[in-house]
Amino acid sequence: MTIGEIQFRVRYSECDPMGVVHHATYPIWLEMGRTELLRATGTTYREMEVAGHFLVVAKLELRYRRPARYDDVLTLRTHVLEVGAVKILHEYEIRRGTEIILVATSTLGCVDREGRACPMPATLRDAIATTEGMAPGA
Amino acid sequence: MTIGEIQFRVRYSECDPMGVVHHATYPIWLEMGRTELLRATGTTYREMEVAGHFLVVAKLELRYRRPARYDDVLTLRTHVLEVGAVKILHEYEIRRGTEIILVATSTLGCVDREGRACPMPATLRDAIATTEGMAPGA
Amino acid sequence: MTIGEIQFRVRYSECDPMGVVHHATYPIWLEMGRTELLRATGTTYREMEVAGHFLVVAKLELRYRRPARYDDVLTLRTHVLEVGAVKILHEYEIRRGTEIILVATSTLGCVDREGRACPMPATLRDAIATTEGMAPGA
Amino acid sequence: MTIGEIQFRVRYSECDPMGVVHHATYPIWLEMGRTELLRATGTTYREMEVAGHFLVVAKLELRYRRPARYDDVLTLRTHVLEVGAVKILHEYEIRRGTEIILVATSTLGCVDREGRACPMPATLRDAIATTEGMAPGA
């Protein structure tokens, strides 16, 4: 399962005095996309944390194409580009109908309870690799 | 030390499409007021948590008097009304100059790492009681 | 239509270092409950704003019963208690299954573009009154 | 005035269940950095908006180096790299003492009330260019 889509409605509190979604809101939505994509692989991020594996954002690149507004229904497509030994690369696209609102990429690392880099759980790597025939990278 | 004041500037992201501070922003500021008031007693909330004491909000009442806007400089006055065995009552007032923006009260409880009610740390109760001659309540 | 329910999942960013939902998150959810309840009457808050009517929170009382956690699915029940000439009273309950997480009440006022108190739009008052046979109050 | 520094303390609500600052908090701080840098040029973003000029984020790149924690005092250095006819490039660095927490860059565009691209106000371009002898670019 390397691609997933979620739909959600823009909250009033997510918008700013320009009447549009504040740019700091988008990373929160991208995280929701990752949460739901992980659930679709048969595990959950909550279970990963209980098992002592934490995903931390190392890099985030956001390109804001068009403003979104309060009460808009948006679609977020989350795509796992590559899953390595200790890193995952995601690509994102947020649309309102056919209009592209935002595109983004992120790099996440896996850390243990003490915040030290650690290997991705095998179940996660396998689930991602198997479902779509994607070869786990380095 | 039962009364303290802090000043802060309204962030753009804290305002909504009406061009005013979103009402969910205020509890965040009240928490800052408690953090600084605690620091003034000679301890910090970070140290309390390390020692295994956590303060959780049980009740919050907010009365919004006037809108605040982006870039306003606001003053928050935080007042400990009563410190009991397991609870603290605070009263708050946010002003812009002499104009009252918000008044509020809160009840916080003390819990341990497992979330069970536990007695306030003695150092906290003493610091509050001593500084202002305020008798710790029940 | 004076009662409505929505379900939503707790976001990671809505939780704090105690591992529970931060108390300032709840007012955001209550606002979502009002948005959806209004939509169920046949109008939307977005349309109200376009028509020059804005609802502002005058008073908010929150009682936190139990902590909620990341990835919990919560149910919010929003209830219009009374709709007056210029004010609306709401009552809220957030549950996780049968467990009560939070109860709250709010008072909202209607204002125009300049922020002056103004009468509730008749369509809103009628929709609320008619659907449930509730007499609009003062 | 092309470089400025601000200091601020991490709020409890800005941290997540890992006990560190949530990654979506950083863009909010970068915006504070821009607000204060603009103030140092002799104008304010609030005045720019009143005059009908709005700055919107077109691109944002964040590299998270180390976690920050509740109650940390952080220093944000904001640097205008280039000011063009319709765009501004900024570079940022957030430190805790000498430790680098985050580095970032952003591209902002200037738009009018209707959201159409428009030239940067001359006063803004001049203030930036004059203060540091920086030649406004294209």
Image (cartoon, coloured by chain):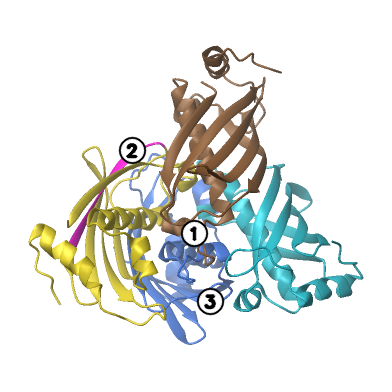
Chain colours: A brown, B blue, C yellow, D cyan
Residue B114 occupies quadrant: top left
Left or right of residue D58: residue B138: left
Q: Please tell me whether mark 2 sits on a helix, a strand or a loop.
A: strand
Depth-wise, is mark 3 or mark 1 nearer the camera? Answer: 1
Q: Answer yes or no: is residue A109 visible.
A: yes
The answer to whether residue D133 is magenta is no
Q: What main secondary structure does the magenta stretch of the protein show? A: strand
Q: Relative to residue A20, is residue C22 depicted above or below?
A: above
What residue is shown with label 3?
B74
Amino acid type at circle 3 is Leu
What residue is shown with label 2?
C73
* Chain assignment, label 3: B
Q: D72 or A134, which is in the foreground?
A: A134
What residue is shown with label 1?
A15
Are the residues under badges 3 and 1 in a single subunit?
no
Q: Which stretch appears magenta?
A: C71-80
* Chain assignment, label 1: A
* Neighbour tally class for label 2: few under 14, some 14-19, many 20 plus, Cα within 10 Å: some
Depth-wise, is mark 3 or mark 2 nearer the camera? Answer: 2
Residue depicted at x 51% and y 42% = A98
